[in-house]
Amino acid sequence: LVRLRARLSRSQNTLGKGLLTLLSREHLDEETWEEVEDTLLTADVGVAPTQELVERLRERVRVLGTRTPEELRGLLRAELLELIGPDEDRSVHTEGGLDVPAVVMVVGVNGTGKTTTTGKLARVLVADGRSVVLGAADTFRAAASDQLQTWGERVGARTVRGPEAGDPASVAFDAVKEGIAEGADVVLIDTAGRLHTKTGLMDELGKVKRVVEKHGPVDEVLLVLDATTGQNGLVQARVFAEVVDITGIVLTKLDGTAKGGIVVAVQRELGVPVKLVGLGEGADDLAPFEPEAFVDALIG
Ligand code: GDP
């Protein structure tokens, strides 16, 4: 965790440092506030949250009068934390039922890190003493099932897979069936994320969910979003949110961008919390999203 935090700060703290430098100017004129806005927008915070934050900062700074660096840091920390939502429930629900495993669907556009995230999540759960079955329902991308199975072998989870280009819903159904038969705690279902036809995606993801629900409820639908794709990622996120009820966001590749403001933007966009963050390609590079640690990394 300490290592992850270090990596997070390395990639993120330009935003907070930039803001602190601007706010430390003796005279905060209109131009400076515009620079504050630009800094936030460049970090992908999004227009509406940026305006809100700047308005609140202006008011707080006005009330404060002269500012010590510590006061500024505290003020910025509090306002950023408020924007991110310190009190959201960010736990991934994997309790399941009496005789049915918890079911977690992992959805998102291809290339965002869906399969990797599914594998990393399996690892976290297995390390926690839970038994996991993986469902390779991304039958569209040829290598996805192999990739998931490799993760499964690595972490100690059985992978249920179907024929190439087979029916994703049937693989998902079989995976949960296998999970029930084995008395597994959690079934993680990796899904396909081709976006070019929205109706196709809608039919497919909706069908996967409905078919799985014949066994029992789906506990989580996690949307995987690549933090480096900025506003494009947000547009994609919206499409997914229209076709299936998202319960949490996994923001991947945060190690590869200083634009951590996307956390704020995507939560606003979807109205669901970021629950996990990906901070690298390795098996241990998935971490719970902790608003306080994140803001500390932003401010540096
Ligand atoms: P999928 O098509 O959505 O299933 O995407 P993959 O899981 O195959 O991931 C696509 C690429 O992104 C792979 O090279 C992964 O190693 C990489 N990747 C996934 N998550 C992260 C992350 O958090 N950080 C970095 N740097 N790379 C990641």
Image (cartoon, rainbow, N blue to C red):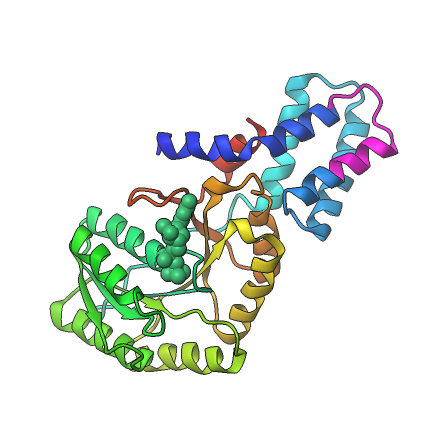
Residue 92 seen in the current view: no
* Vertical position of residue 22 compared to residue 165: above or below: above
Q: Is residue 29 left or right of residue 226?
A: right
The single residue placed furthest to the right in the displayed view is: 30
Q: Residue at x 57, y 61 (%)?
A: 270
Asked whether 247 or 254 is in front, the reply is 254
Q: Quadrant of the N terminus?
A: top left
The single residue placed furthest to the front in the displayed view is: 142
Q: Position of residue 257 (x, y in %)?
A: 53, 41
Question: Residue 90 lies in magenta, yes or no?
Answer: no
The single residue placed furthest to the left in the displayed view is: 182
Q: Is residue 127 left or right of residue 117?
A: left
Question: Residue 27 lies in magenta, yes or no?
Answer: yes
Residue 181, image quadrant:
bottom left
Q: Residue at x 30, y 53 (%)?
A: 121
Q: Residue at x 72, y 52 (%)?
A: 48
Q: Position of residue 5 (x, y in %)?
A: 42, 32
* Vertical position of residue 215 compared to residue 87: above or below: below
Asked whether 217 or 188 is in front, the reply is 188
Q: Position of residue 126 (x, y in %)?
A: 20, 51
* Vertical position of residue 62 compared to residue 276: above or below: above
Per the rendered image, the range of residues in magenta is 24-37
Residue 224 seen in the current view: yes
Q: Position of residue 210 (x, y in %)?
A: 37, 81
Residue 138, image quadrant:
bottom left
